[in-house]
Image: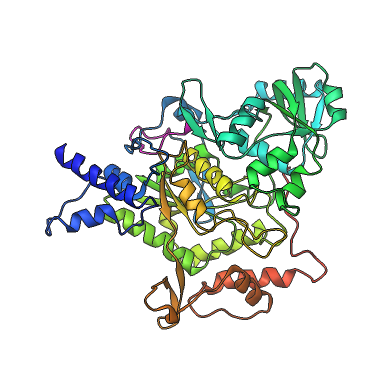
Amino acid sequence: MKTLNLILQGFFRETMERPSLIPFECFVRKKRVQKEGKKTRFPPSMASTATFVAKSPNFPHPIPNASRPQLPASLRLALPRHLSIAVAGRRSSAAPRAAAASCSLIEPDGGRLVGVVAPEGPAREALRREAAGCPQIRLSRIDLEWVHVLSEGWASPLGGFMREAEFLQTLHFNCLRLGDGSVVNMSLPIVLAIDDAQKRAIGDRRKVALVDTRHKPVAILSDIEIYKHNKEERIARTWGTTAPGLPYVEEAITKAGNWLIGGDLEVIERIKYNDGLDQYRLSPAELREEFSRRDADAVFAFQLRNPVHNGHALLMTDTRRHLLEMGYRNPVLLLHPLGGYTKADDVPLHWRMKQHEKVLEDGVLNPETTVVAIFPSPMHYAGPTEVQWHAKSRINAGANFYIVGRDPAGMSHPIEKRDLYDADHGKKVLGMAPGLERLNILPFKVAAYDKKQQKMAFFDPSKPQDFLFISGTKMRTLAKNREDPPDGFMCPGGWKVLVDYYDSVTPQETNRSREAVPA
């Protein structure tokens, strides 16, 4: 115990002197070297705490409990009896099984996953009949994506569209305080807008039916609360600007109604898109079951909305190597591309998934230690505010490590020639965000093309002349012009998919293929 106290005192002293996220080659490794060659191996719980979690002196937190608790009984009961598991881009049958008692996955926010999809049978049919007699709210495509997010527990412990108290806590504190006084992170408002006519039609009713664009009932929202939709406040607090041209704002907020409606959600049946990708849309409960099936003792998540190049792969494989060195036995990568709304110049989901499949087929990432799944959330491009949502939701999926890169969830300023957010603020915010203390943040190491070695490598600032930085814009330009990148930048199969995508886009189109909508 005395040794542990000395180690932690040294950790906090160094952290206070240099309050930033600590890279892999850091405190624990240095302390090991200082032991004059003695081969001491810290247990994973201490290593993950001392190595990856740095707290701001301005927002002190206790050291998180990194013992990676077992799944609670309530969650084990919620897991489906039969699952089809995504393995290396395909689904294979899995025998019925409960979550293993020895499961070491991180506990979901609030202690259990919130699942609001009605079970198949009489309960589902009763809900469908009830929806037929309720006032209807027609959902936009993005609204339906949020129903999907809520229905599977990505936003646990949130069980429906936000009421006003939840909305205000999210806007002003980026977190929700639960009934027991604990705090969970919640940085993005998950809300449903209605207009004046819809508000009048609802009147004093306590339930409404949510229907898709074909008026098919999707869910019931009950014990409802209607409150004012202050769009300017919402935009300013979420994006830090009200400049015109923010993609999500233009798509989902500007023309939305002047009222918000919140309540408890009951979804009639699981959201499906029937686009050939539903096998990748694993819920948090299914992902937890898959990680348990693979006997993972650590899960590290990588969020992306772009094609995977060899620099990304280098970072992910290097992360696993370091986790093994720290004492973890079988860390598993969650490669988790965003599958909801994205802006017009992003590569569409269908093509991104084809590219990810090739990355696995070509062996750039190991299929045995990689789970590829689609994260159903829409994209806000809200920088440090949104990256907290991306991290929080992966806790609910079972991840206890989260890789964060340069300018996460960022974009160019819509009217000025600069980035909208400071490139380093996202990872700094994650290191001190309330409600994320249990999550270990892994800072993105900068990778670039090493011209001498002819491969992607970690940038060496002592030899800058040896490296070539290939930006996303440069990558897209090469693909559009059918020019090959340097050998070793991306696997050939993955690059061909990217070239094929840009070949499929005619000059008259808006560089955007049609995205699937839920059926």
Q: Position of residue 296 (x, y in %)?
A: 37, 46
For the question of whether residue 117 can be seen, the reply is: no
Give left or right: position of 27 versus 257: left
Give left or right: position of 165 versus 11: right
Q: Position of residue 286 (x, y in %)?
A: 51, 40
> In terms of depth relative to the viewer, which is nearer, 297 or 225?
225
Give the dominant element type of the magenta stretch: helix, strand or loop. Answer: loop
> In terms of depth relative to the viewer, which is nearer, 445 or 377?
445
- In the rendered image, residue 99 lying in the magenta stretch gets the answer yes
Give left or right: position of 29 versus 368: left
- In the rendered image, residue 415 lying in the magenta stretch gets the answer no
What residue do we see at 57% from left, 70% from top?
471
* Quadrant for the C terminus in the image: top right
Please say if 148 is above or below 509: above
Please say if 195 is above or below 419: above
Q: Position of residue 275 (x, y in %)?
A: 69, 51
Please say if 55 is above or below 414: above
What residue do we see at 63% from left, 30% from top?
168
Q: Position of residue 179 (x, y in %)?
A: 50, 20
Which picture quadrant has residue 417?
bottom right
For the question of whether residue 445 can be seen, the reply is: yes
Which color scheme did the rendering employ for the protein? rainbow
Which picture quadrant has residue 367?
bottom left
Magenta-colored span: 98-109
What residue do we see at 63% from left, 25% from top?
165
